[in-house]
Amino acid sequence: MSNLNEENNILRDTVREFCEKNLDEKKIEEEKIDNNINSLLASQGFMGAKISSKYGGSELDDISYHIILEEFSKYSPSIAMKIFMINSLYLPSVINTEYESYLQDVSSGKMNVSVDFMNNKYKLEYGNNINGTVENILNTDSENIVLFDGKTTIVNGPFKTREKDFMGFKGLKFGSIELNNKYNVIDKNSRKEKIMEDSYNDLSAIALGIISGAVDKAMDYSRVRTVFGAYLKNYEPLVFRLSEMYSKENILRSILYSNLDKYYTFNFAMNSIVEIARFSVNTHGGYGYFKDFGVEKFYRDAIILKSVFYGNSELKQLSNHVYSEKLTFI
Amino acid sequence: MFEEYDDYRKQIREFGLKEFTDEVAAKYDRGEEYPDYLRKKSLSLGIVDMQNPAKILIAIEELCRIDAGLGISVTTPYFGAEVLMLFGNDKQKEFLNDVYSGKYVLGLGVTEASGGSDVAHIKTTATKKGDKYILNGSKMFITNGAIADYLVVLARTSDEDKPHHGLSTFLLNTKLNGFKANKLTGKLGVRATNTAELTFDNIELSSEDLIGEEGKGFYYIMTFFNISRIYVAAQGLGIAEGAFDKILEYVKANEIKDENTMFEIADVATRIEATKELTYNAASYLFKFEPRPQLTSMAKAYAGETAVYASEKAMEILGANSLEENVERIFRNAKIMEIWEGTSEVEKLVISRFILKGE
Ligand SMILES: Cc1cc2nc3c(=O)[nH]c(=O)nc-3n(C[C@H](O)[C@H](O)[C@H](O)COP(=O)(O)OP(=O)(O)OC[C@H]3O[C@@H](n4cnc5c(N)ncnc54)[C@H](O)[C@@H]3O)c2cc1C
């Protein structure tokens, strides 16, 4: 990649080696990310990738951060999501607030935190404590959580949680939390919209990792699997599509790392990800449908990423950006 | 089409809504467990009527609309029956009554680890020894494999220049010595269905276990697929309709009115309607004994892709709300439709071949 320098390539290799040496993706999906993995990630500076060195973070630039997200996502989208939640969502939620100092324990892996990015409406009561149930929380085993309930609120645990099976990012605990906890409004405005918009490139990096993992698996399989006496790589329709997907992967990498335009990049990533992950499953035939082959997980995570992070409001933001005005729709 | 079965359709839907609750569907999905009690219940209530193909089609569609894992589980214990019905000897045809009554569960073993698309190159052998055949080899991804009492199995009986010439079909009793089934777990979807890897170690089959004529197995299986694919199309149609139900429920409950979502609804509805027309049309030829394999394969491929498309749209339109299990399960179930009974790519080969042959 022309716009990546030697240092960037070394970082990429380092993350790859770290994954291969320390992580067992199937185990992560089955048994979740545990404290051991948290500490390992923290010890290498991944947990606090963007956090200031003042709080023990690595204070990386965007390119380095995206390399980390991409490479982890390729190996384990759950780990990438965890790093994303800390650095792209939690960090900007607490920065310049009295809770900023929490970042010290977050980057050292001692404190597990969460940010609710899924809910738009809450039915919560505010007294001395905050009361009510919040559904669909990723990373329920957190010590504190940020909610965007029209304002920006931090709620301290421990939480009463109800875990649910979750199709995507299986390495993270998911479910609802029942609140009867102390809370603090850290910003009277919701920081959500800006935080989400600022994280487009970060999400694109996670998408790129999923795409890259899915394409690699399919291409590798096409080189070893035979049908009707020939390798899959000898069949036009299959190879034409895989090659198109490989092209898309490289276009995405190129526009992401050249910082072309985060709106275009995010749109391109979200429009490519599900189709590519789905076709990787197809290429594997029946094997693709089983978790042992490690490819169906990309399809699950791809649709979750797209469904949760990309919808009408993101398309509106893209359109406002393209038209350079705040459009109103009928 | 098939309006004469409207009452039957209603009855099936009522059964499905009553029995396939979210709790039941989630339980069997999570536990990867076959719901045998539902198979028995559906039989005792006459829900599944294997003697009437139109009714089977409707039952599959309506049950998969509610939950494909459970719907396929209760409509698939007869899988492979058409091979016996069309090509079996009298005894084998009589045996079918025990399958239809639910005494025995049936399955069909064609696919092997080395390949499912390329049926002609299977490696399992049935070697003639006196008046017996000795079955050796293995099968992969066989539905009902670990719960079936009998299986229709494709094996090589002779080496011929053209590989599809030396294949034969057998009715295999799974209680015979040398049979082993290893249940496979970790499927993305349709997790209530049972899938297994089978091994055959010197299983002695009698000549009475041969179905039809020796060497005609490939033809029998292809004939079977040209029938069974219409039922897979019905599975896909049902899944797409179920996904669409969820979209409508959500859009109405949340009073969503933006034009972009309206267009999405229109697109999904149009594809479902096209799938239905295609599937029913292909089925009507088949049920008149005038099969048009290219139409059947079009229906199967299109329905499979529509199931996937509609389920992805349901996930996207519902956004974070799609995480409610019943929607994400639809998404996970849908994907199998593009894989089993001939992948979409294999269907496309069939379609173009038949069209070019001018049939
Ligand atoms: C849950 C489950 C249940 C199943 N149940 C049964 C069962 O009951 N009985 C049974 O016999 N089988 C069963 N199968 C097997 C299923 O039918 C096969 O998986 C399917 O036919 C594909 O075969 P394969 O997996 O070997 O893929 P392969 O044949 O290896 O195909 C790999 C890829 O190559 C593509 N491809 C193949 N040929 C071409 C070509 N000429 N041009 C372009 N692309 C091509 C395929 O479309 C696919 O994308 C089941 C499978 C699953 C997952």
Image: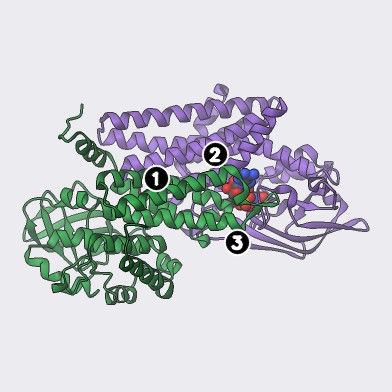
Chain colours: A green, B purple
Amino acid type, residue under disc 2 in the picture = Gln
Identify the residue position indicated by label 3 in the image: B183
The quarter of the rendered structure image containing the N terminus of chain B is: top right
Badge 3 crowding class, 10 Å Cα cut-off, few under 14, some 14 to 19, many 20 or more, is some
SS of the residue under disc 1: helix
Identify the residue position indicated by label 2 in the image: B235
Say which of B333 and A16 sits in front. Answer: A16
Residue at point 50%, 57% (across, down)? A217
SS of the residue under disc 3: strand
Identify the residue position indicated by label 1 in the image: A272
The quarter of the rendered structure image containing the C terminus of chain B is: top right
Letter of the chain that mark 1 sits on in the rendering: A
Is residue B340 among what the camera can see?
no
Q: CA distance from mark 2 to mark 1?
A: 27 Å
Amino acid type, residue under disc 1 in the picture = Ser
**Residue A99 position within the rendered picture, expressed as x and y whole percent measured from the top left:** 10, 66
